[in-house]
Amino acid sequence: AQSVTQPDIHITVSEGASLELRCNYSYGATPYLFWYVQSPGQGLQLLLKYFSGDTLVQGIKGFEAEFKRSQSSFNLRKPSVHWSDAAEYFCAVGGRTGTASKLTFGTGTRLQVTL
Amino acid sequence: NAGVTQTPKFQVLKTGQSMTLQCAQDMNHEYMSWYRQDPGMGLRLIHYSVGAGITDQGEVPNGYNVSRSTTEDFPLRLLSAAPSQTSVYFCASRTPGQENYGYTFGSGTRLTVV
């Protein structure tokens, strides 16, 4: 069964500092990987995705993520955090085969940004 | 293009009451799913559908029913609400064959069962 682990429940960074959110997945083959962001009281917005090709993927709002097959990881990074980045971030894995291709989410990392 | 629309946004139910959470999408997506979000548990799949007339159970289906009579709509029914069903519910949809594109999510329904 596929699964996602986000080991950091809560992270606090200063505005302007760099950010890395960790994500480890379990899947039997090469998965589709996603990062979503959720602002308070809002739905989920897709930040970026990996499905093939270059292992460093760029997303919206200046975020990037690197797929490392050997470590089963898909960590999210941003060089300089802005106060508006405060939100909850979810990593998700989706299967490549089968009619359902269900998404499995991690438990999320809440990002707090201090000024 | 409205995307995925969920109604209502907020709802308070008494234990034992029934209700239907509505989800509609206007993107002609065949795949639709219902997730519930609880603190510290991320999003968990309740039910999903791969097309009109076809539904299946997800990770936490107990206490919920679904049907899919049209491509556009995928309602979630609570037949007898319980406090354990207090949660935020998200509906999501996508096009088959585009697994790499990810799902489009609605803005959620916050349900409280007292």
Image (cartoon, coloured by chain):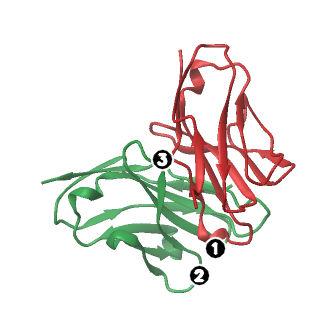
Chain colours: A green, B red
Whole-percent x and y of residue B94? Answer: 66, 62
Whole-percent x and y of residue B73? Answer: 73, 47
Instruction: Report the mark closest to the observer, 2 or 1.
Output: 2
**Residue A52: numbered disc:** 2
Q: Is residue A36 above or below residue A60?
A: above
Question: Considering only order in the chain, which callout, 1 or 2, is on the residue closer to the N terminus?
Answer: 1
Q: Is residue A40 left or right of residue B41?
A: left
Q: Chain of mark 1?
A: A
Identify residue type, mark 3: Thr
Q: Quadrant of residue B26?
A: bottom right
Q: Residues within 10 Å of mark 2 (few under 14, many from 20)?
A: few
Q: Find out whether the residues at labels 1 and 3 contact each other: C-beta distance under 8 Å.
A: no
**Residue A30: numbered disc:** 1
In front of the other: B23 or B48: B23
Q: Find out whether the residues at labels 3 and 2 contact each other: C-beta distance under 8 Å.
A: no
Question: Considering only order in the chain, which callout, 3 or 1, is on the residue closer to the N terminus?
Answer: 1
What is the residue that sits farthest to the right in this orientation? Answer: B53
Identify residue type, mark 2: Ser
Residue B90 shows in this picture: no
Residue that label 3 marks = A107
